[in-house]
Amino acid sequence: REKYKTDVVALKQIEDLFGDISVYTDEFDPFWDELVPQAIKIHNQGQYQMGEWAGSGCVDYNEGRALYTFTRIMQPTCMIELGYAGGISTSCIARGLEVNGGGVVHAVDHSPEHWNTSTMFKEYCTKNIIVQYHSTDAVQFLRDSALMPTLTFSDATHDEEPTRQIAELLKMKWPNATHLYHEWGMSTISGHVERSYVSMQNLIGTQFERNAFEKVFGSEYRHGGLYGSCGLGIVMPM
């Protein structure tokens, strides 16, 4: 967190995208302090026994704060997240919805129902702010969905073909929504600066979300991203 609060380049990105977010940062920081120990616990267990949790699936401070800020500013009543994993990013979104006073995030993952999710994720499920879809394929979920989200976040598969399918379905079904995705800085087309923020450098060039979203949505949409241990990609209608 302290890194992103003093990093002039990252701060300029946030300011250019949102303007002054000091109010949202003040709201988010105590929540993040509570959430971080849960993230560390999750990523020291099971498939994430790799020491460094930031960049190994979980959002970092800058990415989590951005998800929270998007939720607070856009005030979505319906949101979709593809790939909730440990539920850290979902919890950031759910917190924003809770502060907004309404809204639901539909969280989809192929993992079993009792996979290792954060305590915060479970609490927001009991509050019906998170609706959990476990053991569910993201592509099939999108094909079948009758939901009307105004904001989505994709962090499911990182492979080229299914990621392209996800981007195509999001554009076809919800062309006027804002679509966010993880691993923006890890793409084969990512530049030097965004790659310099990535915590797990060995994964650079192996993630295809950015390739798919920029190609599928094309020049009629506004594309951008925020630096982070994975990077947060942004696709917005013009």
Image: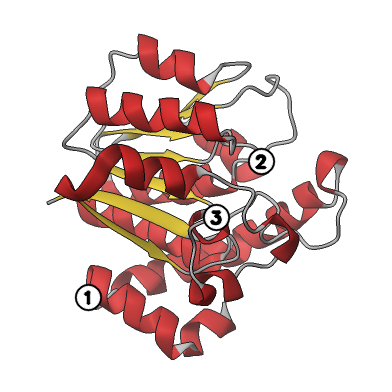
Q: Residues within 10 Å of mark 2 (few under 14, many from 20)?
A: many
Pick the residue in front: 103 or 50. Answer: 50
Above-or-below relation of 181 to 112? below
Q: Nearer the viewer, mark 1 or mark 3?
A: 3
Residue 49 visible, this angle: yes
Callout 1 crowding tier (Cα within 10 Å): few <14, some 14–19, many ≥20: few
Mark 3 crowdedness (10 Å alpha carbons): few <14, some 14-19, many ≥20 = some
Disc 2 + disc 1, Cβ < 8 Å: no
Q: Position of residue 181 (x, y in %)?
A: 44, 47
The kind of residue on which mark 3 rests is Thr
> Toward which corner of the image does residue 69 lie, by quadrant?
bottom left
| Residue 129 percent across, percent down from the top left | 41, 33
The residue where tag 3 is placed is 188
Q: Nearer the viewer, residue 217 or 9?
A: 217
Q: Disc 2 versus disc 3: distance between alpha carbons?
A: 26 Å
Q: Give the vertical position of 60 relative to 83 (above or below).
A: below
Left or right relative to 160: residue 86: right
Residue 231 screen position, x and y as percent: 51, 61
- Under circle 1, the secondary element is loop
Q: Which residue is mark 2?
A: 86
Q: Which residue is mark 1?
A: 19
